[in-house]
Amino acid sequence: MKVYGFIAEFNPFHNGHKLFIDKIKQKYHPDVLIAVMSGNFVQRGDFAVLDKWSRAKVAIENGVDLVIELPFAYAVQSAQYFAEGGVSLLNALSVDKIVFGSEHELDFQSLAKKTLQLDERFQQDYSRSSAANLTDFYRYNGIDVTHDPNQLLGLNYARAIVGNNYDIGIETVVRQRDGYSATLIRQLFSENKDFSKLVPLETLSDFQKGTSVSWDDFFNYLKFQILSHSETELRQDYQMVEGLEYKLKKELDSSQNFTEFIERVKSKRYTMARLRRLMVYTLLNVKESEIKNVYQNPYLRVLGFDQVGQKYLNVLKQNDQKFITRVGKREKTALELELRADSIRQLVDFSEQNFGRIPYMKGVH
């Protein structure tokens, strides 16, 4: 049995994702195809525009056999930890190969080995962002993937595999300049412009239901958190460093919306993505101990499957692998951070994200 897996956000699921899935099947012919997908928050510190259940359903309807949620503790992180989390779940799911889109064919395993060796010599310049420092360091040593974001993420997947000695092969699908972009779709939607030709009907239908969200829907909640907590309390939030709590307080009064606020807080030291993630942590009052707890107590939460995915789940269960398919008293402790994150979204779209929800099942009786 050939089991392939990939890591995705589907924010939202568009025709490019469908093309990617079709290419995997045409090129590699997997018996089972698994997607590890971010939940209601995504890597760059944004709310997923459509909720995780909607996105999981569309993925199953368009060729994925099994969708597993990437926990918040990994999903809202830098590329390194995002990749570490996704790959660790694929390893727990016993996939044979990870597959990802790449602008060019590269020997990712060799690149990963080289960068892991180089890391021992890396020194941080604290006047610049960590990402910029590391990028320049790799480029100086002959590794330049900065102009190809998929390759950079692919390198992090490979580093996670090599660094943890996972028995997972690496395959790629060359990414074409096909015009499909989740960022473009979100922009067109916000501007009330037509994007119907870029997404499958299921995604279009979800947008039409009026349950999409963005940071602007939650700016007042973020303001409340910042205003109602002292600098000392804010300093306890995950990744709040070097006096940023004072900067948040200072810039809040003169900011009319989230975009203006984050622009005022921005500096050369921190990337926009890192600051947006920090705002998510601040909104949710996330503590480092909660992130570590998820790392130390991993779980596999099922969001959807078809008949093939159901059969594979049964195989894994026979091998004593445990899954969360519904939330009860026993699951509340493991999912504590996830439940809090999802409850924030429910303040705006009023759609229950956990209790009473079961995975989407296609063709399963």
Image (cartoon, rainbow, N blue to C red):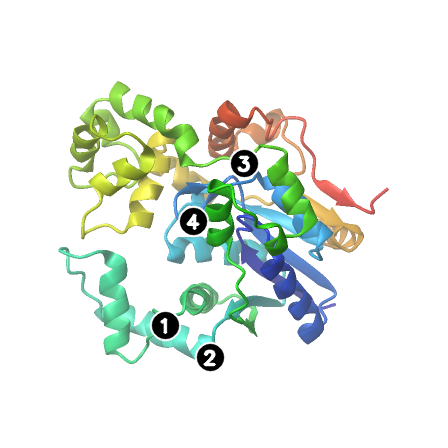
Which amino acid does the dot numbered 4 rest on?
Gln
Give the quadrant of residue 62: bottom right
Secondary structure at numbered mark 1: loop
- Which of the two discs, 2 and 3, sits closer to the camera? 3
- Of mark 2 and mark 1, the one earlier in the sequence is 2
Which amino acid does the dot numbered 2 rest on?
Leu
Q: Which residue is mark 2?
A: 106
- In this view, the residue farthest toward the left is 127
Give the distance between the C-alpha atoms of the residues marked 1 and 4, in whole angstroms. 19 Å
Q: Quadrant of the N terminus?
A: bottom right
Q: Is residue 136 among the parts visible in the rendering?
A: yes
Which amino acid does the dot numbered 3 rest on?
Ser
Residue 303: horizontal and vertical position, in percent? 65, 42
**Alpha-carbon neighbours of circle 2 within 10 Å: few (<14), some, or many (≥20)?**
some
Q: Which residue is mark 1?
A: 145
Which is more toward the observer, 91 or 286? Answer: 286
Q: Are marks 3 and 4 in contact (CB under 8 Å)?
A: no
Q: Which residue is mark 4?
A: 43
Task: From the viewer's perspective, tell me whether residue 248 is left or right of residue 191.
Answer: left
Residue 275: horizontal and vertical position, in percent? 29, 44
- Of mark 1 and mark 4, the one earlier in the sequence is 4
- Of mark 1 and mark 3, the one earlier in the sequence is 1
Residue 292: horizontal and vertical position, in percent? 39, 42
Give the distance between the C-alpha atoms of the residues marked 3 and 4, in whole angstroms. 18 Å
Q: Are marks 2 and 1 in contact (CB under 8 Å)?
A: yes
Q: Which residue is mark 3?
A: 212
**Alpha-carbon neighbours of circle 3 within 10 Å: few (<14), some, or many (≥20)?**
some
- Of mark 2 and mark 4, the one earlier in the sequence is 4
